[in-house]
Amino acid sequence: MRHTFIIILMALITLTTVSAQECVVRFEPERVDFGHINESDGIATRSFTITNTTANDIIISEIVSTCDCTVADYKDVTIAPKQSFEVKVSYNPLNRPGRFDRPLFIFIEGHNEPFEIEIMGRVTPRERTVEEIYFYDMGHGLRLDNTFAGFSYIEHGKHYEERIALYNNSERMMRLRLKHIARSGAIKVKCPKRVAPHTSADIKFYYELPSTSRCYGSLDDKFEVRANGKICTYTISAHGIAVDNFDFYDDILSPRAEYSKKNIKFGDVNSEALPLSATLTITNSGEAPLIIRDVRCTSADVECTLHEGTTIEPGATLATDVVLTPKRSRPKGAFSAQLAIVTNDPIAPYQVITLKAHFKE
């Protein structure tokens, strides 16, 4: 009985403490609603008051926002009992269209936890300029909203499409041409041949590998852009990673690749002590055979004993050697490369191992 009484007493003390902290200040209004504001009108300002509901002075030590778009105009201030202090809050809507809802934290000396008031509203977007929408100035009157068509995994037997928007910012008809300067052999492109003055259009990129394809790993394509026969400032690139079609894999009875290292650091080495070797192990913790689909390194100085087509049975571990043998006679300074491995693991089919070394002078 005495033990139960102590627990109840402690709970009451805790509740009293929390209640006392909650009653230290009062906010009016309880939330700051900016309502609908126009992005084009610039910074908007609203205010709220903090009232000291205690019998003692309180000191506002800090008011913190969760982003730099919201700023509270205040200085360290002491609020006397039953008195109030007005805080002005500014919100910068530039490039922030749509609804916003974020807290503002008020720190009071003597209290470990900050008090919180909600800042909210909705920003009506302004009309964007051509330069803002189509950021990349390709020259010759051509502008693009991007220069990179990023794909994630490209599964065999599926269709993938990305677009780059363009705009003819000139006063005459524009003739367009894309020239392949790096080719994966898997991409298809649909580019408008002509674009009228002050008109937008799309360049469409497609990856669609046959279900019987033996293509795995990085798909990298790069294009030179010509407008009215003149080479443009930037090239356009597309990238994806070819993997198996995982619709045909069982969620439970599937392989699972686990790597002993994600980073291989050879450390500070003497260029005369070559080649350098490290061991990487791959464990199949799944319920089906793990098949190595592709192995590539970004440096010709690295060789790996792991090969395409290697199979690791469920529960088995395979050790592979990663050997660094620089082709140049006396390498100097930092060395960095990436070893990319593609498997039929449906959860994480693509793994990058970072390789680093530093050759002493």
Image (spheres, rainbow, N blue to C red):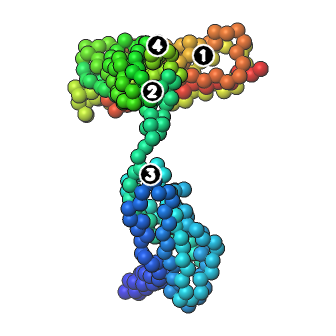
The residue tagged 2 is: 170
The residue tagged 4 is: 229
Q: Nearer the viewer, mark 1 or mark 4?
A: 4
Q: Position of residue 235 (x, y in %)?
A: 49, 21
The residue tagged 3 is: 96
Q: Nearer the viewer, mark 4 or mark 2?
A: 2
* Mark 3 nearby-residue class (10 Å; few <14, some 14–19, many ≥20): some
Amino acid on which the number 2 mark rests in the picture: Ser
Q: Earlier in the sequence, mark 1 or mark 4?
A: 4
- SS class of the residue under badge 4? loop
Choose top left, top right, bottom left or bottom right for residue 270: top right
Q: Earlier in the sequence, mark 4 or mark 3?
A: 3
Separation of marks 4 and 3 at Cα, in angstroms: 39 Å
Q: Residue at position x 37%, y 12% from top?
A: 185
Q: Nearer the viewer, mark 3 or mark 2?
A: 2
- SS class of the residue under badge 1? strand
- SS class of the residue under badge 2? loop
Q: Residue furthest right?
A: 361
Task: Identify whether 99 is placed above or below 35.
Answer: above
Question: In what quadrant of the picture does the N terminus appear?
Answer: bottom left
Q: Nearer the viewer, mark 1 or mark 2?
A: 2
Separation of marks 1 and 2 at Cα, in angstroms: 52 Å
Q: Earlier in the sequence, mark 3 or mark 2?
A: 3
Q: Residue at position x 54%, y 27% from top?
A: 354
The residue tagged 1 is: 324
